[in-house]
Image (cartoon, rainbow, N blue to C red):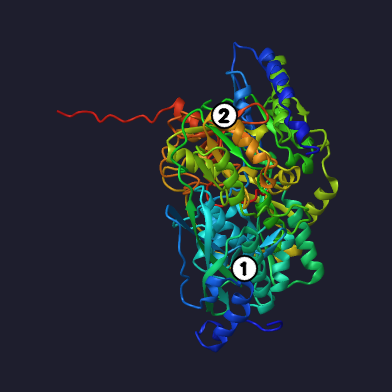
């Protein structure tokens, strides 16, 4: 397949692998956080870790849009369908994410709520046109990549005068999240997570450009390489990070030049800023409340803002007890550190968000790496202390 | 028939039902056993081992590139019977019709079923029709049941794979699933891919004639190749190692899956089979498959291993290694 196969070539992968082995200093460890779930997915699906020397580690970051949405927001979406009788439209990944009280959108749908899986914002608006007597909510999630289509659909609905359509905005911002991780106690104070560099987002950067990362590369003295989602992109970017680390540099470099420019997609940025504004604070699963890390709909478009149109109960829903998704999303723990992983939490019966999406670390660990995990860490039987 | 719609009387047991059966089902399925006109078909069978299988069909949309629910319901059951190495003999068909469904569409489906059954040489000899109220069905559901006779000396089952055995497939993966998705209402995209829906019993007969000792046959329908291989691995208590480069996939299918965020290994097929045989039989089996129109693109895709964890693993085209797990839930498109 053109424009894809070129980035999956075995012989080039071998060459890159050898070069990485040659350049990686055996006297040190390289902990590289791949921010995006897309990278995590590529690393596991293509077996990229197999091609790395033992001292190069990928730390999986919070860049899975489904995973970072906190339980209360999913509770809200369910409430919109169940209590307010709205047709709730959402992207497929979102359907199985656990909400509180053992609910999820897919379970609520089975119980009779009108919840529909859509492939684009256009589908949601179409459903609104076809159901003039019902209110249709588009449950908008995602990073900067999925934000422009939400902005477009709000403007289109306004232009067409659609009265029964609104957007439940949950769009979040990548740079704020990366900065938050770097400021977290695990990285700064406790030092339990050491991150030597970042594989920067690819699709997100195609929208926002590479410039927004300059600040924290400088401030936190960590190199960033914007990396495409293909496996050769990931390997090339890894090599670029290793070079920077070896040379003591901390710059923003762009491996994904075929798509990402320094300034990004100005047209998309313009329409996003017309429709959305910064939210003062937003709760992320795993990171907690992060200031100015999300968007909300501007007052000019409040007729299309679900949060303005409906009286939504403030949910206090929490993650399932014992679920380590929050620490896993910060890179502080691995999926195998979670007691629920592979026991009561599997892709068939996910307890936490990271087990749902194929971009989630737990789902990737389970689906692509289980045999390795089982070999490395056989389940430890806890011996009960004898009390005589 | 041309302009009418299914109504509750078509399932009431009265004259309307008799008329529907006579003018639609008997007319198109036409065969002596059906013409007996009883509630069951009566026939003699040769001595030997019989197999029986049933398959419910609820596909949406009812008509898709390369087929429809009618032909699919015939092929699906023929294939389930044939995966034992059997020669399929007869099919029974049960229809659940939704009130309001257009009779002209029903006739189209029945004609397609009749053609599929005739082409395959497996007659539909008995059936049943029920009508449910509007909103309680999705147009038409078809359940087919088939019986077949297993030739002497043939012993095919999912628990017979042994380490060292060879895994083969008869052609390109994922055509059916992608064809269906391309015609789903909210996901229309233009593609030339058509469903691979086809009856595999003739191919199986040639394979079994060439290699009577073939050990496992299974059609990777829902859940795709990955799930089917995991089933066999579990049943046989073995592992499998695949080679991604060797798995036949059309460029268009790979591209569609890439766009939708799906993995072709998990996409449904309706005209594919996986065969497992001893290593010394592999070349002969592959040749027999290649000589059949439904096996032109057959290939050896992997080996059975002694992994006692029962894992199916794959060397990726990229040079790494990954596990190929069971399908979890439903394949959902990724959002970004």
Instruction: Answer whether residue B80 is visible to the viewer in this image.
Output: yes
Q: Which residue is mark 2?
A: A187
Write down the quadrant of residue B159 in the picture. top left
Q: Position of residue B311 (x, y in %)?
A: 49, 34
Mark 1 is surrounded, within 10 Å at the Cα level, by few (under 14), some (14 to 19) or many (20 or more) other residues, namely many
Q: Which residue is mark 1?
A: A87
Q: Position of residue A13 (x, y in %)?
A: 71, 24
The subunit carrying tag 2 is: A
Q: B221 or B256: which is nearer to us?
A: B221
- Helix, strand or loop under label 2: helix
Which residue in the rendered view is the most extreme toward the left?
A: A388
Label 1–label 2 contact, CB within 8 A: no
Q: Position of residue A291 (x, y in %)?
A: 63, 45
Write down the quadrant of residue A30 in the picture. top right
Vertical relation: A373 (above or below) B90: above
The subunit carrying tag 1 is: A
Vertical relation: A364 (above or below) A278: above
Which residue in the rendered view is the most extreme toward the bottom?
A: B15
Quarter of the figure that contains the N terminus of chain B? bottom right
Instruction: Answer whether residue A332 is visible to the viewer in this image.
Output: no
Q: Earlier in the sequence, mark 1 or mark 2?
A: 1
Write down the quadrant of residue B28 in the picture. bottom right
Marks 1 and 2 sit apart, C-alpha to C-alpha, by 42 Å
- Indicate left or right for B129 with A299 as reference: left
Question: Which residue is painted at 50% across and 55% down in the image?
Answer: A99
Vertical relation: A290 (above or below) A277: above
Q: B149 or B92: which is nearer to us?
A: B149
- Indicate left or right for B313 with A205 as reference: left
- Helix, strand or loop under label 1: strand
Q: A143 or A361: which is nearer to us?
A: A361
């Amino acid at each position: 397949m053109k424009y894809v196969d070129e980035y999956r070539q075995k012989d080039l992968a071998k060459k890159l692998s050898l070069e990485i082995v040659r350049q990686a200093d055996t006297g040190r460890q390289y902990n590289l956080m791949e921010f995006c779930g897309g990278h995590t997915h590529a690393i596991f699906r293509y077996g990229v870790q197999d091609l790395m020397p033992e001292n190069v580690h990928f730390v999986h970051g919070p860049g899975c849009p489904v995973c970072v949405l906190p339980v209360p927001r999913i509770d809200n979406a369910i409430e919109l369908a169940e209590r307010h009788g709205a047709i709730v439209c959402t992207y497929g990944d979102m359907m199985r994410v656990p909400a509180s009280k053992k609910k999820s959108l897919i379970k609520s749908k089975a119980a009779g709520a009108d919840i529909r899986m859509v492939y684009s914002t256009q589908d949601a608006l179409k459903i609104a046109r076809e159901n003039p007597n019902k209110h249709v909510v588009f449950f908008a999630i995602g990073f900067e990549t999925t934000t422009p289509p939400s902005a477009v659909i709000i403007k289109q609905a306004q232009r067409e005068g659609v009265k029964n359509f609104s957007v439940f905005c949950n769009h979040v911002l990548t740079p704020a999240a990366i900065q938050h991780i770097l400021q977290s106690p695990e990285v700064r104070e406790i030092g339990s997570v050491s991150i030597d560099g970042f594989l920067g987002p690819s699709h997100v950067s195609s929208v926002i450009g590479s410039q927004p990362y300059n600040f924290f590369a400088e401030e936190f003295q960590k190199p960033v390489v914007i990396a495409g989602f293909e496996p050769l992109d990931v390997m090339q970017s890894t090599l670029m990070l290793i070079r920077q680390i070896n040379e003591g540099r901390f710059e923003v470099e762009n491996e994904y030049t075929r798509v990402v420019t320094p300034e990004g997609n100005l047209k998309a940025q313009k329409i996003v800023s017309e429709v959305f504004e910064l939210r003062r604070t937003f709760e992320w699963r795993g990171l907690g409340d992060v200031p100015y890390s999300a968007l909300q709909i501007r007052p000019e478009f409040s007729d299309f803002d679900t949060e303005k149109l409906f009286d939504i109960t403030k949910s206090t829903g929490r993650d399932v007890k014992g679920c380590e998704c929050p620490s896993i999303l910060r890179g502080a723990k691995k999926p195998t550190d979670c007691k629920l992983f592979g026991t009561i939490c599997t892709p068939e019966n996910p307890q936490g968000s990271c087990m749902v999406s194929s971009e989630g670390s737990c789902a990737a660990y389970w689906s692509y790496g289980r045999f390795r995990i089982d070999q490395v860490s056989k389940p430890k039987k806890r011996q009960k202390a004898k009390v005589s | 028939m041309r302009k009418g719609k299914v109504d509750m009387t078509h399932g009431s047991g009265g004259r309307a039902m008799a008329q529907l059966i006579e003018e639609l089902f008997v007319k198109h399925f036409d065969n002596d056993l059906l013409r007996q006109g009883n509630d069951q078909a009566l026939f003699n069978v040769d001595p030997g081992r019989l197999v029986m299988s049933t398959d419910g069909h609820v596909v949406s949309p009812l008509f898709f590139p390369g087929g429809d629910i009618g032909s699919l319901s015939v092929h699906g059951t023929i294939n389930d019977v044939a995966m034992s190495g059997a020669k399929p003999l007869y099919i029974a068909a049960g229809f659940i019709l939704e009130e309001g469904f257009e009779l002209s569409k029903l006739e189209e489906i029945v004609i397609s079923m009749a053609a599929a059954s005739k082409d395959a040489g497996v007659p539909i000899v008995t059936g049943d029709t029920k009508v449910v109220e509007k909103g309680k069905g999705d147009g038409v559901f078809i359940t087919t049941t088939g019986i077949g006779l297993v030739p002497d000396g043939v012993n095919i089952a999912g628990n017979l794979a042994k380490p060292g055995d060879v895994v083969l497939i008869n052609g390109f993966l994922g055509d059916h699933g992608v064809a269906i998705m391309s015609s789903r209402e909210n996901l229309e995209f233009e593609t030339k891919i058509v469903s691979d829906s086809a009856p595999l019993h003739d191919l199986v007969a040639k394979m079994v004639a060439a290699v009577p000792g073939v050990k496992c046959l299974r059609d990777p329908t829902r859940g795709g190749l990955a799930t089917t291989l995991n089933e066999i691995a579990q049943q046989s208590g073995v592992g499998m190692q695949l080679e991604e480069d060797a798995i036949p996939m059309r460029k268009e299918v790979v591209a569609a899956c890439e766009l939708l965020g799906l993995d072709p290994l998990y996409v449904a097929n309706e005209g594919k089979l996986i065969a497992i045989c001893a290593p010394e039989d592999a070349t002969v089996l592959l040749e027999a498959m290649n000589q059949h129109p439904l096996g032109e693109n057959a290939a050896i895709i992997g080996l059975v291993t002694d992994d006692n964890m029962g894992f199916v693993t794959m060397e990726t085209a990229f040079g790494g290694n990954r596990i190929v797990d069971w399908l979890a839930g439903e394949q959902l498109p990724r959002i970004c």
